[in-house]
Each structure stands twice: as structure tokens, then as C-alpha cells.
């Protein structure tokens, strides 16, 4: 980690005469070096910012793979969320699972955390991960702590349900706004594909995670890319359908 540098600008060099690598702290003591080069995380903004369109706080993280191999099975855990000024809990709106972390390295995983899956990163690849936080007072910026999880097994099984008509799907400022009617206490999965024919093929159809909970009113779902979907929509070339499930 170079002070003041951008971690996504780093480069690796390979040689047939490698030198022994070591790291020391300010007192000259040897530090433990990991054998696995972890993904790199860049947070361009100091705190999540309120998106007036969705009413959610967003944290746009840049994740990079500086290795010469594909990075798959990667997760990002979020901990450290507390309460807003109204004393309501702040939570990760687009979480895809939960886990427990051992942040104090005492052998006990006692810190609860939310988890999202990070799409597969090619060698030297990078992507933007948009984390969304619900804050009831719309004023208190969340202070999340991010921890990478390596070697995870993430998979999505396409659900079954009743297909609904979409009221509108608009591509605006690099994101898709999808609107549809809901019924209270039912779940709604948004599925997507790059062509209409792919949308009707179970082998090419993809499901966005997590699902939405129905409110009894029309809702708006925003496709802003990972972790909800595998990639950000580009040039408006994406098609959607909505499934209503119990």
C-alpha cells in the first residue's frame, strides 16, 4: 500500500530471479505476509451519500484484482452499522446474506455482518460495487466497515412465480428505473437479460438479488449494477421481467 496512491493503479512484475519479500513495522519488527494477494478496495468518497431518487445512502466502491489469475468466489461483508438520529437501526438494503466475523482475532466469530457477492474479476479487472443503506431519518451517514471474504460459494437458482406486467423501464443516467405494481407482503424478483430471447431462456436468464417486498403500491427498482446484477446496464441494452412469489 503506497501512501497517497490509488490501489487500482498498482502493477505486478514477474521475474525468474525473485527476491525474498519481507515487511517490517515502524519498530523494525517483521510482519506476517499473507500468501494470497487479496482484492483491493478503493472508496472514492469518505461517507455514503444520499440518493434522492431512491431515498437510500449509496457507497460506490471500486474493487480491483491485481493478480494474474481470475478472482472468483469473492464476498464483501459489512459490519459496524449502528443507529440514526431517530434511534432506528441502519441496515444494508441490498444485502444478499448474513455471516459472523472474528474482527478481534480471538477465535470467536461474534460480530454480525451482512454479505454481498462480488462478481468474478478477471486478471487486472475492476468494477464498481454500489452498496445501498436504508436510514430512516435520511440524515445520518452510515459508517460501514468492509471485510473481504475469500473462497465463498455463491449461487442463484432462478425462482418460479407469476410473471407481472412492468409499468415502465427507463434508462436514465447510466441506470435502469423499473416500475411495477405490488401486493403487500409478497416477494418480487427482477430478472434480466441482454436480449428478449435470452429473457425467455432459463439458461441465459439472470435473477437480481435481493428480492423486493411488496408494499401494495407501485414501486421503483433501480438497476445500478453489482451487487444486485452481475454488471451495470450499458447503453440501455437490458430487458426485464418481474416474478411475484409468496
Image: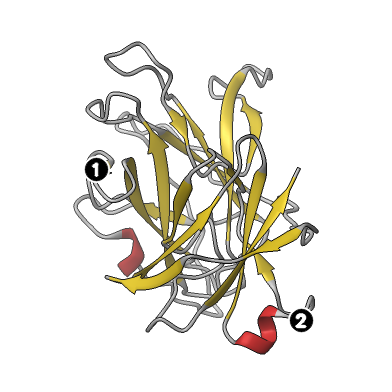
Disc 1 crowd, CA 10 A, few/some/many (<14, 14-19, 20+): some
Q: Check disc 1 and report its element: helix, strand or loop.
A: strand
> Does the rendering let one see residue 35?
no
Quick one: label 2 or label 1, which is nearer the N terminus?
1
Left or right placement of residue 25 versus residue 5 in this view: right
Residue at position x 68%, y 84% in the image: 198
Q: 222 or 164: nearer the eye?
A: 164
Q: Is residue 50 above or below residue 239?
A: above
Residue at position x 54%, y 24% in the image: 103
Q: Which residue is mark 1?
A: 49
Left or right placement of residue 94 versus residue 5 in this view: right
Residue 189, image x, y percentages: 64, 55
> Does the rendering let one see residue 189?
yes
Question: What color scheme is it?
Answer: secondary structure
Specify the quadrant of the image occupied by residue 98. Answer: top right
Image quadrant where one finds the C terminus? top right
Amino acid at each position: 500500500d503506497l501512501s497517497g496512491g490509488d490501489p487500482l493503479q498498482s502493477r505486478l512484475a514477474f521475474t525468474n530471479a525473485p527476491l525474498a519479500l519481507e515487511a517490517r513495522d515502524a519498530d523494525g519488527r517483521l510482519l506476517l505476509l499473507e500468501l494470497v494477494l487479496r482484492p483491493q478496495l478503493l472508496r472514492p468518497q469518505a461517507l455514503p451519500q444520499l440518493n434522492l431518487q431512491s431515498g437510500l445512502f449509496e457507497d460506490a466502491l471500486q474493487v480491483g484484482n491485481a493478480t494474474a489469475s481470475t478472482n472468483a468466489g469473492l464476498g464483501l461483508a459489512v459490519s459496524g452499522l449502528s443507529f440514526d438520529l431517530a434511534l432506528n437501526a441502519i441496515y444494508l438494503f441490498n444485502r444478499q446474506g448474513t455471516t459472523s466475523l472474528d474482527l478481534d482475532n480471538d477465535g470467536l466469530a461474534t460480530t454480525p455482518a451482512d454479505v454481498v457477492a462480488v462478481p468474478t474479476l478477471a486478471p487486472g479487472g475492476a468494477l464498481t460495487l454500489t452498496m445501498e443503506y436504508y436510514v430512516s431519518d435520511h440524515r445520518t451517514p452510515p459508517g460501514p466497515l468492509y471485510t473481504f471474504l475469500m473462497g465463498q460459494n455463491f449461487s442463484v437458482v432462478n425462482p418460479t412465480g407469476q410473471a407481472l406486467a412492468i409499468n415502465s423501464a427507463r434508462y436514465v443516467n447510466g441506470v435502469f428505473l423499473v416500475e411495477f405494481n405490488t401486493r403487500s407482503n409478497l416477494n418480487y424478483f427482477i430478472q434480466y437479460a441482454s436480449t428478449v430471447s435470452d429473457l425467455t431462456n432459463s439458461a441465459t436468464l439472470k435473477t437480481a438479488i435481493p428480492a423486493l417486498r411488496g408494499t401494495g403500491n407501485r414501486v421503483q427498482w433501480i438497476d445500478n449494477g453489482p451487487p444486485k446484477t452481475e454488471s451495470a446496464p450499458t447503453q440501455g441494452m437490458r430487458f426485464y421481467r418481474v416474478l411475484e412469489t409468496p
